[in-house]
Structures are given as C-alpha cells and as structure tokens.
Image (cartoon, rainbow, N blue to C red):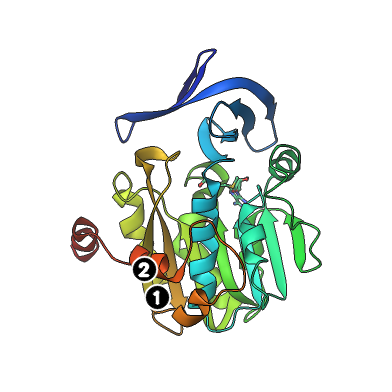
Amino acid sequence: MTTLDTHWFTEICEEGGSAFSLRIKRKLHEEQSPYQRIEIFETEKFGNLMVIDGFVMLTGRDNFLYHEMMSHPALFTHPDPKRVVIIGGGDCGTLREVLRHDGIEHALQVEIDERVTRISEKFFPELCESNNDPRAEFYFGDGIKWMAEAAPGSVDVVIVDSTDPIGPAKGLFTEAFYRDCFNAMGGHGVLVQQSESPLYHMRILKPMHAAMRAAGFDDTASLFYPQPVYPSGWWTATLAVKGGPAGEFREQAAADKSFETVYYNAGLHRGALAMPEFFRKALED
Ligand code: SAM
C-alpha cells in the first residue's frame, strides 16, 4: 500500500506496522505493463526511484548495497563460476555486478517483464552500462518455466533477483523451483535469492531454508546487510550451495578482487554470514 502527496512517496508495510518515505521532486514515468504497474520518480536525495505495484524496487543512491550483496558473495562462494543465470533482475544492476568478474563466460538474465529493462535503460542508464557486454544475454520470459526446462549441469550460479513472493514471483519461493535450480547445476552450484527482511519476514525466511535443503542443497546461509529503502531497512540474501558449505568462500580472491565495489569486500562478506541469535533460534525451532 502506498500514499503519495505532492512531496512524498510513502510505502506502507502493514506487516511491519511501519512506513518509509522519500521526498520526491516529480513523477517521471508511469505505465501498466502486462505484468505489473511500473512507476519512476525523481527524488530529492536518493536519485531516481523505481516502484513496482506500489513497492520500492530500487533507488539510484543505495541500490549498490543490494546489487553487490546479491552477486559477489555467491560468485566468491562458487569455486569457479562461469555460467550465471539471473532470474528477474530487470533493472540490470545485478547483471552489471556479475560481469565485473573476469571468469564469467556467460550471464543470462531471465526477466518476465521486458518493460522493466526498457524503462531502466532510460532512467537508470548506469545500471545498464554492461548490457552490451558480449557475455550478456537477455531472455524475456518466466524464470520458473525457464528453470524447469534448463539442461542438467548447464548453470554454475543462479541469482534470484525477484519481486516479493506474490504475483509472478510467487513460484520462485518454492521447493519445486529450488529443485529445478539444483538439477540445472553441475557437481558444484550456488543459488542466491533475495529473501526479505530478517526482522519482518521470518515466515518467508524459515521455510525458504527448509525448502532449499529439501530440494537437495547441501547447505544454506543467509547474508545480512543494510538496505535503507526496503521495509525495516535491514535485508537478507540467502545462499543455497550444492557440493559444499554455504559459509565458506574464496576469501583471498575476494580480498584481491580486480574490480571496485562500493560496499562489498571480503570482511563484509565474512561479517554478513554471522547469524543473529533470534534468527538462529527461529531456524532451529
Ligand atoms: N531489488 C528488487 C526488490 O527486491 O525489490 C527486485 C528488483 S527486479 C526489478 C525484480 C524483477 O523480478 C521484476 O522486474 C519482475 O518483473 C521480475 N520477476 C518477477 N517474477 C518473475 C518471474 N517469475 N520470472 C522472471 N522475472 C520475474
């Protein structure tokens, strides 16, 4: 649910009993795609803002937190990632981060709504700056269907950069989808999924860990990081690893990374894996 007066965009989170507002200058774009309502605002201090169906997707100012934590931990957890599939991620920010890794040979973005990508090209050109990289490929269709049909052993890392588990994204939060991801991977594979707020959404996080393990993954771990524009300001990405532990990663390679980041580094990766007590207890109960 959202409210909008002439100066503020507000997203109300009924579940958390809270709201987050951004002071806006003007609305830049609004359309109803075949899948969802997409709006773009120019804010006063957070750059451009994308809203889908009333929910904040990203802002120009702080999306680096989300995009870096959705990509680099998973890529440094896999021993040698070459083939990446991004499910959703239409704004292309995760794709840009993935392509910073020299070892990546192919990164496919499977986004259900082409309009999200076209609008991002216009209003978030910095996120789309790697879209012409020869290693990048775009497929506009349903990620659930795509994964069900993926060839066994054809993917090293799956990144689920989706909207919340409602509407077209609902099936991305199920054991059946995780099993399809597992089967698409070879002997060693890493899945990472945006997994909502640890403070507000344990009803999503706890079954997610259970479903990933039930689907065959050897280990799971959530990464905790700040995300000011999402409900509670505190967010998670959850890793599921086939053929290895989720809490181990190529720490020296992360420390020696050949590209610049704004947030991610090896120490933050290690720290993001530390589990708060309430979270550990909720998973164990
Ligand atoms: N960072 C964002 C967040 O957590 O709020 C997500 C950003 S990205 C814009 C999410 C994308 O997931 C949307 O563009 C949406 O169209 C896409 N999506 C939702 N369900 C999908 C599905 N089943 N297959 C592929 N893409 C999907």
Residue that appears at 79% across and 63% down: 133
* Left/right of residue 113 with respect to residue 7 in the rendered view: right
Determine if residue 285 is in view: yes
- The residue where tag 1 is placed is 246
Local SS, label 2: strand
Residue 83 placement: quadrant: bottom right
Q: Residues within 10 Å of mark 2 (few under 14, many from 20)?
A: many
The residue type indicated by label 1 comes to: Ala
Q: Answer above or below: position of 130 versus 186.
A: above
- The residue where tag 2 is placed is 221
x, y (%) of residue 218? 39, 79
Q: Answer above or below: position of 134 versus 50.
A: below
x, y (%) of residue 181? 55, 70
The answer to whether mark 1 and mark 2 are in CB contact below 8 A is yes
x, y (%) of residue 264? 48, 62
Residue 131 placement: quadrant: bottom right
x, y (%) of residue 128? 72, 51
Local SS, label 1: loop
Q: CA distance from mark 1 to mark 2?
A: 6 Å
The residue type indicated by label 2 comes to: Ala
Residue that appears at 48% across and 45% down: 164
